[in-house]
Image: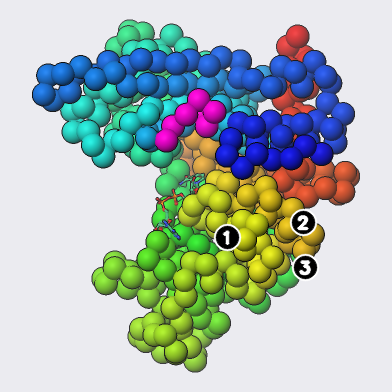
Amino acid sequence: MDFFCMNNPFQNAMTQLNNAAAIMHLDTNIHEILKQPERLITLAIPVTMDDGRIKVFTGYRSQFNNALGPYKGGIRYHWDVSVDEVKALSFWMMVKCATVNIPMGGGKGGVIVNPKELSEGELERLSRGYVRGLWRNIGSDKDVPAPDVYTTPQIMGWMRNEYEKLVGHADPGVITGKNIEDGGSEARGYSTAQGGVYMVRELTRKMGWNVAGTTVAIQGFGNAGSFMAKILHAEGYKIVAVSDSKGGVYSEDGIDPDKAEKIKNDGGMLGCYCVGTVCNIDEQVSDDGPCRKITNEQLLELPVDILVPAALENVITQDNASRIQAKSIVELANGPTTPEADEVLKEKGVTVVPDVLANAGGVTVSYFEWDQNVKGEHWTEQDVLTKLEKIMVDAFNEVWETKEKYAIDMRTAAFVKAIERVADNMKEQM
Ligand code: NAD
């Protein structure tokens, strides 16, 4: 087995590829091709700043593999963007799309910039400039970008508009993550969490747990975590802890996330509002009552059935992995578990539903958005959810079967299953 290099995401991605390749006896020619992106584009983007100066920004688009369909993946605006990060993220997008078996390939883009330092006009000129450098290589049949860190539906709107001006015709499917009135999909707003909920349901079945007795702790109360908490609570799971960047709350009787959010909106901190009888519904969180304030570190180490990291990457590390008491982890965040921690969790017998499967509901509904755009359709919310559930449940069961077949963990199983699919299509196209 190859080992991981802590600092280089692309080397880590290639280690994952090599490990999966060894298990599945991947064809050596296919393995060779998968060691780099099919196309790596570097852009120098001149932007006229508000003071009249020209500043040149560096941007990238990595098109890793399109054996299953057009490249798909977000565009990130961040000061830490690097070639190796973009290449790794495009590889992981390939794996994610192939894990859930949607007809999209892997891509990712980024610009080295601190968007908070730009005026709105500068941001618009940068976004249009990015597309002017890239337009020949994107399109609904080639490469379909989407929002990522610090890029928004507004930025996607500018990019789509610039692209359509350059090609001279409408192509709403060139970019996803649009507002509904601009061709976005129903349910996209909570699709990542909804996909994660389907994973929790399947896991509960496999483990033979009953829903009412199953305890869940969720780190992060943003788009992914807050919807996850609310939907699971509505389904009858016991949410015993939630947190955001300011810290968390814990109640062994269970927390009502809608009411916890209301306290956050009113006062800036997540509140408690227990579901059970021990804690009065109006009781505020205190340090020694049945509802306790906890830190984010304490949340990760609670003795729960399901731990859901839904905030940052690298929160479960070799430093805290041995203290994790959760029976299972459902990774709604991208990359919350380091490779070293993964090894410890494997030894402890913790079942990890990996990010490439657990949070793939988001990219799946992005694919639905693209599909609706290219067909000129608009599906109802119920249609979207029915299709999403089938894709996610099928993917869970395929990964589970692969895990059993090779006696490996679910993360490696997802990589094996995904690379098997990509390799089969590559062979057909050779
Ligand atoms: P978000 O910005 O909406 O929310 C992030 C949440 O994390 C906030 O509640 C914030 O308070 C909390 N947070 C920040 N720092 C924290 C800390 N130190 N400790 C605990 N909590 C902290 O982001 P999001 O869209 O919910 O994304 C969360 C994770 O899910 C990311 O890893 C993201 O890549 C992943 N993800 C999101 C989507 C999606 O569709 N939103 C899709 C796939 C993966």
Judging from the image, what secondary structure is the residue with disc 2 in? Answer: helix
Q: CA distance from mark 3 to mark 2?
A: 20 Å
Hey, what amino acid is under mark 1? Val
Q: Residues within 10 Å of mark 2 (few under 14, many from 20)?
A: few
Is residue 382 inside the magenta stretch? no
Where disc 1 sits, the SS reads strand
Q: Nearer the viewer, mark 3 or mark 2?
A: 2
> Which residue sits at x=29%, y=68%?
268
From the image, tell me which residue sits under label 2: 346
Dot 3: what SS? loop
Can residue 173 be seen at all in this image of the molecule? no
Q: Please, what is the three-letter code of the amino acid marked with disc 3? A: Gly
Q: Quick check: 315 above or below 258?
A: above
Q: Residues within 10 Å of mark 1 (few under 14, many from 20)?
A: many
Asked if the residue at label 1 sits under 8 Å from ligand 1, the reply is: no
Foreground mark, 1 or 2?
Answer: 2
